[in-house]
């Protein structure tokens, strides 16, 4: 092996490191766990120093077993959880724990920001939601003014790790698009949006494309990790954009459906295509001259895990009870809003429900209803993306739920679109970050590096189910407006 590339993903539950060779084959991987602090209801925080310590442990584990390979690293790529507000003073010391993407404290500030800046949605391409970074700073300004006055820089989680790696204040377009401070169409910071939060460009890192160089590894870390020559650190990307690079969804029209804890329907776009009326996320991609849209479901595979906890039967056993096929929709309908919902409702107070329960209802009816309810939520996302001008003909299926062929058949039939199953392998955000490292280190075209992964199977819509699910989905869509008042009262 002549060269190697390191990808780092700064997640919420762990930091993952992967080492690729020049053929993009994985040489080694390691992870280090992280914990989340929840000091008050709806709060979610982490100590930024924990990200750095976990990064050092993950890279250290790779170095211990693969020091010769690590010594030949030419590029390092970064990915990470989006939206986290990391507030630094003039000495680069964190002023408080970082406020994470799943923190819900800033609902009031979202409304205040939209009132203060009438063009917010037009510029940012997104609705102000508590998950984004700007409302978090507005909350700090209101509730912790002494801390706000000391803020010298605001960084996203992966960019705090970059600061530790390189000493540079830099971020990429895709991650920065999730702050509500970026002019997403122009791919520059918006003075108008920053002013609404009492900040300036001076508080922000400089911007680069995700496939471009964004600093070099510090000499002391090169020595510690045994790397011969200081590698380039790539701009990198937010976790979903980096995952898209990992599976090869970078060309306009390329799409994936992620059946993870949460669900994401992701489509690459040739232009900025917002649809704020239906809570679509419209962000820059991690590669130049490309954008992407996401419909987001907050409880996808997590809905099935919830049912597993309630019944005392693990998720694979629950789906096994259904057999290999379903003959038609479950008599029970499930709303998967266990943690609220993003697309299309933008309602953090929405809640889940089973409707249509009867004495004859069996556990298998509930399991099937959960699979279908999540699939219907994906269909809502598809409609929202199509309303913004996107065409979705097929998508790659990723995430833990994609291992269930039955669930993919249900989802393909609800979406009326084929789903491609990729070659077995970990092509997630850390892998995508390593691909971006190749681009930056070798000045390579991202389209030639971030190629699609091999498809080993395609799950087609079941013609017998497509029409039945279209009918059942009309019932599903009627439930949220009918139950919304009692959900939140």
Image (cartoon, rainbow, N blue to C red):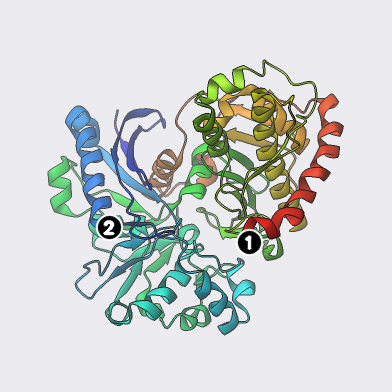
* Residue depicted at x 27% and y 57%: 47
313 to 377, vertically: above or below: above
Local SS, label 1: loop
Give percent across and percent down for residue 443. Answer: 42, 50
In the picture, the quarter occupied by the C terminus is bottom right
Q: Nearer the viewer, residue 320 or 462?
A: 320
Q: In this view, does 255 lie to the left or right of 68?
A: right
* Residue depicted at x 41% and y 81%: 200
Dot 1, crowdedness within 10 Å: few (<14), some or many (≥20)? Answer: few
Q: In this view, does 137 lie to the left or right of 27?
A: right
Q: Which of 259 and 145 is in front in this view?
A: 145
172 to 357, vertically: above or below: below
Local SS, label 2: helix
* Residue depicted at x 43% and y 46%: 436
On the image, numbered disc 2 is attached to which residue? 48
Give percent across and percent down for residue 444. Answer: 45, 46
On the image, numbered disc 1 is attached to which residue? 489
Q: Specify the quadrant of the image occupied by residue 471.
A: top right
* Residue depicted at x 33% and y 62%: 98
Rendered image: mark on residue 334: none
Q: Is residue 292 left or right of residue 50?
A: right
Which of pointers 2 and 1 lies earlier in the amino acid sequence?
A: 2
Q: Which of 418 and 226 is in front in this view?
A: 418
Give percent across and percent down for residue 229. Answer: 20, 46
Q: In this view, which residue lies farthest toward the front?
A: 359
Whether the residues at callouts 2 and 1 have beta carbons within 8 Å, the answer is no
Is residue 389 among the parts visible in the rendering? no
Give percent across and percent down for residue 6. Answer: 32, 40
Q: Distance between the residues labelled 2 and 1?
A: 37 Å
Q: Specify the quadrant of the image occupied by residue 419.
A: top right
């Amino acid at each position: 092996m002549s060269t190697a590339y390191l990808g780092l993903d700064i997640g919420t539950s762990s930091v993952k490191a992967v080492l690729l060779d020049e053929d993009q084959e994985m040489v080694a991987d390691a992870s280090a766990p992280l914990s989340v602090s929840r000091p008050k209801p709806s709060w979610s925080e982490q100590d930024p120093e924990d990200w750095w310590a976990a990064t050092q442990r993950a890279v250290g584990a790779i170095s211990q077993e693969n020091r010769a390979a690590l010594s030949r690293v030419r590029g390092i790529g970064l990915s990470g959880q989006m939206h986290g507000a990391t507030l630094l003073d003039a000495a680069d010391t964190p002023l408080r724990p970082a406020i994470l993407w799943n923190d819900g404290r800033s609902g009031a500030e979202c409304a205040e920001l939209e009132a203060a800046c009438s063009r917010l949605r037009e510029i940012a391409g997104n609705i102000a939601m508590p998950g984004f970074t700007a409302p978090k700073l507005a909350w700090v300004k209101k509730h912790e003014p002494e801390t706000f006055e000391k803020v010298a820089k605001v960084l996203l989680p992966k960019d705090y790790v970059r600061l530790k790696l390189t000493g540079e204040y830099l971020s990429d377009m895709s991650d920065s698009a999730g702050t509500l401070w970026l002019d997403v169409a122009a791919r520059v910071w918006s003075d108008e949006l920053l002013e609404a939060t009492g900040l300036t460009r001076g508080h922000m890192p400089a911007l680069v494309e995700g496939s471009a160089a964004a600093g070099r590894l510090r000499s002391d870390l090169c020595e510690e990790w045994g790397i011969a020559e200081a590698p380039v650190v790539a701009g990198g990307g937010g976790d979903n954009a980096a995952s898209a690079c990992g599976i090869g969804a970078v060309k306009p029209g390329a799409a994936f459906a992620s059946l993870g804890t949460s669900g994401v329907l992701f489509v690459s776009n040739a232009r900025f295509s917002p649809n704020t009326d239906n809570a679509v996320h419209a962000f820059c991609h991690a590669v130049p001259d490309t954008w992407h849209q996401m419909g987001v479901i907050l409880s996808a595979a997590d809905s099935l895990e919830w049912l597993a906890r309630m019944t005392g039967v693990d998720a694979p056993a629950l789906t096994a009870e259904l057999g290999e096929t379903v003959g038609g929709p479950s008599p029970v309908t499930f709303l998967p809003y266990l943690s609220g919902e993003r697309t299309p409702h933008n309602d953090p107070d929405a809640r889940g429900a089973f409707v249509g329960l009867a004495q004859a209802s069996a556990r298998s009816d509930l399991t099937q209803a959960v699979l279908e309810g999540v699939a219907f939520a994906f269909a809502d996302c598809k409609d929202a993306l199509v309303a913004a001008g996107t065409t979705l003909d097929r998508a790659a299926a990723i995430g833990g739920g994609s291992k269930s062929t039955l669930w993919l058949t249900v989802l393909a039939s609800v979406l009326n679109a084929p789903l491609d199953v990729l070659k077995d392998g970990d092509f997630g955000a850390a892998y995508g970050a390593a691909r971006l490292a190749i681009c930056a280190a070798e000045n390579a075209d991202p389209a030639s590096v971030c190629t699609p992964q091999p498809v080993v199977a395609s799950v087609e819509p079941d013609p017998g189910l497509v029409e039945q699910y279209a009918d059942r989905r009309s019932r599903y869509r009627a439930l949220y407006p009918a139950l919304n008042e009692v959900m939140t009262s």
